[in-house]
Image: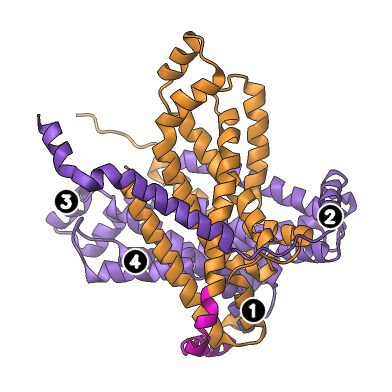
Amino acid sequence: MMGSIQHRSAGVWHRTRSWFWGLLIVIVYVWGIFGINFSKIQSSAGAVTKAVLMGIIHPDWHYVYQGNGEDLVSVMLQTLAIAFVGTIISARISIPFAFWAAKRRRHHFSVLSTSGRIVLAVVRTFPEIVLAIMFIKAVGPGAFAGVLALGVHSVGMLGKLFAESIEAIDAGPGESILSVGGNAVNGLVFATLPQVLPAFASYSLYRFEISVRSATILGMVGAGGVGTPLLFAIQTRSWNRVGIILIGIIITVTIIDYLSGWLRKQLG
Amino acid sequence: MKLPKQTIVQRFHIRFFGSLIILLGLLIASNNFLKLDFSALVQNFDQFLALFKEMMHPDWKSAPFVVQPMLETIQMALIGTTLGTLLAIPAAIVAARNVVTNKWITGFVRIIFNMIRTLPDLLLAALFVAIVGIGPYAGVLTLTIFSFGMITKLFYECIETIDNGPLEAILATGGKRSAMVMFAILPQVSSRFISYILYTFEINVRASTVLGYLGAGGIGQQLQTSLSQFRYDQTAVIILAILIVVLAIDGLSNFARERLQ
């Protein structure tokens, strides 16, 4: 009975709703497909694809280790180190930002936490490579610019995740410390931090996985790591070199993901 | 009364301090390896600030020239996400363990998909620019592969959580595998699939804004030009445009995903 009444009162909108959304999607797609100004695919596309695939099948094994600090092992280690230091820096910066952005009471609007959220969203959206270029202007090209770019950019994501884990903690331990005469610092050290540190560590590891991927491309703008030799190899069309670098990146990222996933499981 | 006892590991927080020491050791090692010079940052910080100050005065006159490439960026993300999804649906079905029971097949295709997922967006863009040439084609191809990797994983994990009853019922009554996919799998996952597609679209819009930096079309091209000409006032306008579009798309997509649930 109730159902049928509701059905009738829903009226025109209810009946035409799916048509409306369908039409909207069709319009968006027509705009997307016909609006885009496709240039011609260059005629050598087939040959280059073949060359790239051949390069991956016959990689330049000599490049793996040459002992001069310019080989694949060295630049891959450099990439990992950039991601690692960048993540540590950003985790450290993220903690105060997270306390800023975390809501004290659920479902309450607060100017403080909303402003923190907006700042973190802006940091998250600011393109990483632009940050890298800005830091290159300040400290010169190289690994340091990459570290700083990752350190600042990751705050946007880590700050948000940290803030969410602060909001999710159990208020009980903190209240009991206050009720037996502890001060706010005691509450932070003995109630809040022990509850959030495992989550912070887990999110930092997760961010490290993402930062490793980012660090592989930061080199394309000159911020250190494997991106520089990769872009150089692509531009000089040395596909065997491109092949071995791609293999190196795939193996490294896979190992890091696996290790980090295992560690995150240990953290619970 | 018997008090609970702490083990030595718990008493002295061995796990915590142990991990702290390992972390510090790794940090020092990486520092030495990269030869980081933090004093350089302090010395040159005024240059960074000067650059930032220039960005604080955006060149509003260049704003109209940002609109068309920005739209192209969204179009690239739209087409890339769609093509990636179309490829991902069959791929996810092959990789789902409750649909394809042969562990060798699922294991093999998952290794391939994992490998695709390790490649960052700009790296793919550099490759596709070398293959098809400068322009939005390279961007669309990049985003297709990029979203394929992401969506496939989300999809097969989603398919594995569904109720197997309808699948078995269709097979038991003599239905074909294609009927099973159409009438047992897709109806159970479609709303979550749409949510994942929207989520991937958000990520693709973010990614597509910088692809042009390497020549793969969209607003990134303008970004690269303004940066190489040291016109940071124009860079600021582009970044603001990226900010507005990304936040708007995120908001819309979040709204749609909440409505779906």
The chain under label 4 reads: A
Of the image marks 2 and 1, the number of the one nearer the N terminus: 2
- Secondary structure under badge 2? helix
In the picture of the structure, the residue carrying the numbered disc 2 is: A48
x, y percentage for residue B210?
59, 67
Q: How does the figure colour the protein chain or chains? A: by chain
CA–CA distance between discs 2 and 1? 32 Å
In this orientation, which residue lies closer to the viewer: A228 or A236? Answer: A236
Labels 2, 3: one chain: yes
- Residue sitting at 11 percent across and 36 percent down? A5
Q: Nearer the viewer, residue A66 or A120?
A: A120
Q: Earlier in the sequence, mark 2 or mark 3?
A: 2
The answer for how far apart the CA atoms under marks 1 and 3 are is 50 Å
Rate crowding at label 3 as few (under 14), some (14 to 19) or many (20 or more) other CA atoms within 10 Å. few
Give the magenta range.
B42-67
Quadrant that contains the N terminus of chain A: top left
Q: Which colour represents chain B?
A: orange
What amino acid is at disc 4? Arg
Looking at the image, is mark 1 or mark 3 earlier in the sequence?
1
Q: Which disc number belongs to residue A176?
A: 3
Image-quadrant location for residue B128: bottom right
Q: Residues within 10 Å of mark 2 (few under 14, many from 20)?
A: some
The subunit letter for the residue under badge 2 reads A
